[in-house]
Amino acid sequence: MAVYAIGDIQGCFDELQALLAKISFDPDNDRLWFTGDLVNRGPKSLETLRFVRDLGPVAVTVLGNHDLHLLASAYGYRLDHAKDTLQSILEAPDREALIDWLRRQPLLHHDAALGFTMVHAGLPPQWDLSLARRCAGEAENVLRGDRLGEFLGHMYGNRPLQWSADLDGHDRLRFIINCFTRMRFCDDQGRLELKSKGPPGTQPASYYPWFEIPWRASRDLNLIFGHWSTLGPCSQPGIYPVDSACLWGGQLTALRIDTAPERIDLPCTAWQTPGKE
């Protein structure tokens, strides 16, 4: 059985199918991990969402910021963006089933047998695996429960910037969501910097890629993540970024993880021009 972790698709359904053909994906024997952002900005968000949903137990996906944006849109908290391509889902006859499936997906996936952990964006340096799983569970319970609509109205925002066990209410949930789905940089105290989206070296002084904080409590993990299409090559031990900018004309990446990690890349046609999200 082969297991592949695949980077952000964002509605690039045809490219996903081409990548699966390239790796000779066999749903009877192989398994897929998706780093989230299944939808938005690409041309076939509806087809992508249906395909991954219909894979059933063959696939696991974690939630990304664009997936949460879809949930917010479906619940009436949409912040319109000219580049959004969510309308096909919002108008689909199976919209409610798709939204219900999406909101039940995890924020973190850990496989002890394979020795890999997957999130969409990152982990703050204060969190080890145990704390990360507890925090993911807190947010997942809200996303799956009756309080979802209420929370989505408070989800957007950059504060609080730093983890504390004393955080509560919407502030606590917002920080958890921002870490799992939005973070790229933080300082050596673990304070998030959520505005910078470029490669390392373009962020404000005193901030670093989240995985470069020396005292990071998750440094014993093999972490797979997406979200950071501008990151570029990374040689940090245990760090496996797989968002290779498919949407922007880069590549769609599959990382085989049941053997020694092996990257398989598919060159992609740009569907969007790089710029602000």
Image (cartoon, grey):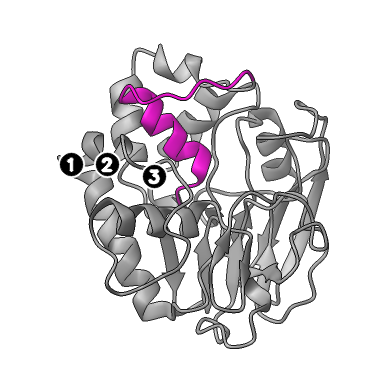
For residue 235, the mark is: none
- For residue 248, what is the image quadrant? top right
Q: What's the magenta region?
A: 62-82
Mark closest to the chain's N terminus, 3 or 2: 3
Residue 67 highlighted magenta (yes or no) = yes
Quadrant containing the N terminus is bottom right
Could you tell me if residue 2 is visible in this image?
no
Residue at image location 35% in from the left, 29% down from the top? 98
Q: Kindly state the secondary structure of the residue where label 3 is placed.
A: helix
Mark 1 and mark 2 in contact? Answer it, CB < 8 Å. Answer: yes
Q: Residues within 10 Å of mark 2 (few under 14, many from 20)?
A: some
Q: Amino acid at mark 2?
A: Phe
Marks 3 and 2, how far apart in space?
27 Å
Residue at image location 31% in from the left, 59% down from the top? 172
Residue 50 highlighted magenta (yes or no) = no
For residue 151, the mark is: 2
- For residue 259, what is the image quadrant? bottom right
State the residue position of label 1. Answer: 147
